Image (spheres, rainbow, N blue to C red):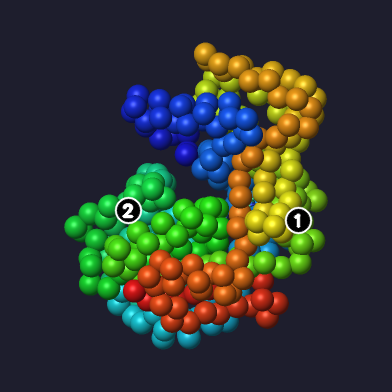
């Protein structure tokens, strides 16, 4: 969703229609993908540095500590397909141990990937690299240039948690059908206070990340959201085993956009993101339902995060 993307008129209309349908629903909602404009992506990077946001550093510690076992479970020489690669840093750390024959980073903007890949090609001349710009959350059409020798999908960071469990299952099935094994990071259920703090940090970075969505909507829709009239809510919902992020109106207000209007009462919310938290068993069940066999899983000492290697 970076702002510099060139979009066709049809794409622009699809985005507009999707956003307006969500904003005018009785319980207003927007897809979490709209959190990631250029500033939103930078704010997410800042979130990963926060003391309260444990997932990034806990996952990195698992890869660090169990790197050799992970490499021997996965095996060398695979085609490593990095889903949501960003700056490719997480996968690049695994190159020395996994020794992939081909590296295929996929992200919504190929332009963003190109600089990172150019640098990596100089560092790892033996690995063939192919950067792909696509929204892999809905379809996964891999071009013939992606070797089908032995595919390993890499999906770290517990991004799987941002899918509704039904969508997560459909997504995992698509990976399975694309003939890939899977190395995936999953955030686990834990003490509620830890979860609440991770999504409502003292510095207010997650609040800024959430509120910045309104800037993005203003640009995409020509809307007049006033950020000062909204507050961030981020909390764990134990019944649904998920973090929910919302934006809550501070008073009765009206929002207008080109061709539309919506009134919000004080306290009314726009639901902006879910982040599902699994137990080791509930996630193993999801993998199994998608047709994968869990080969091995690794967690940190506190049992906060899990990395799974699953085979077709
Ligand atoms: C990208 N995703 C895994 C993050 C998460 O933890 O669900 C997004 C995020 N939202 C608020 N903080 C981080």
Residue, disc 1: 196
> Mark 2 — residue?
140
The reply to whether residue 125 is visible in this rendering is no
Task: Report the front residue among 187 and 145.
Answer: 187
What residue appears at the point 73 percent right and 40 percent down from the top-left corner? 232
Q: Residue furthest left?
A: 144
Left or right side of 52 for 81: left
Contact between marks 1 and 2 (CB within 8 A): the answer is no
For residue 285, above or below residue 265: below
Answer few, some or many: residues within 10 Å of disc 2's Cα (few below 14, many 20 plus, some between 14 and 19): some
Q: Which residue is painted at 74% across and 51% down in the image?
A: 235
Cβ at disc 2 under 8 Å from ligand 1 = no
Residue 198 x/y as whole percent: 72, 57
Q: Can you say whether 21 is above or below 174 in the image?
A: above
Tell me where residue 17 appears, x and y as whole percent. 46, 27
Nearest the viewer among 84 and 295 is: 295
Give the CA separation, mark 1 to mark 2: 34 Å
């Amino acid at each position: 969703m970076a702002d510099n993307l060139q979009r066709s008129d049809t794409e622009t209309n699809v985005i507009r229609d999707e956003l307006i349908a969500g904003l005018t629903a009785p319980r207003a909602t927007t897809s979490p993908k709209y959190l990631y404009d250029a500033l939103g992506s930078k704010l997410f990077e800042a979130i990963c540095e926060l003391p309260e946001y444990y997932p990034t550093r806990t996952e990195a510690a698992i890869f660090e500590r169990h790197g050799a076992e992970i490499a021997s479970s996965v095996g060398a020489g695979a085609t490593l397909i990095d889903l949501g690669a960003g700056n490719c840093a997480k996968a690049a750390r695994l190159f020395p141990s996994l020794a992939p024959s081909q590296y295929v980073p996929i992200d919504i903007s190929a332009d963003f990937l190109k600089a990172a890949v150019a640098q990596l090609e100089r560092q790892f001349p033996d690995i063939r690299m192919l950067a792909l710009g696509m929204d892999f959350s809905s379809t996964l059409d891999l071009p013939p240039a992606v070797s089908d020798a032995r595919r390993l999908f890499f999906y770290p960071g517990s991004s799987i948690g941002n899918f509704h469990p039904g969508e997560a299952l459909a997504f995992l099935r698509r990976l399975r059908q694309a003939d890939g094994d899977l190395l995936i990071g999953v955030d686990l259920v834990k003490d509620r206070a830890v979860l609440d703090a991770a999504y409502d940090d003292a510095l207010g970075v997650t609040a800024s990340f959430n509120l910045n969505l309104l800037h993005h909507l203003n640009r995409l829709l020509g809307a007049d959201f006033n950020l000062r009239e909204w507050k961030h809510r981020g909390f764990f919902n134990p019944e649904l085993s998920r973090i929910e992020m919302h934006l809550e109106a501070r008073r009765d207000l009206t929002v207008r956009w080109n061709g539309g209007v919506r009134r919000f009462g004080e306290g009314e919310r726009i639901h902006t993101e879910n982040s599902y938290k699994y137990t080791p068993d509930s996630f193993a069940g999801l993998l199994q339902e998608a047709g994968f066999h869990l080969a091995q899983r690794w967690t940190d000492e506190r049992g906060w995060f899990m990395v799974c290697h699953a085979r077709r």
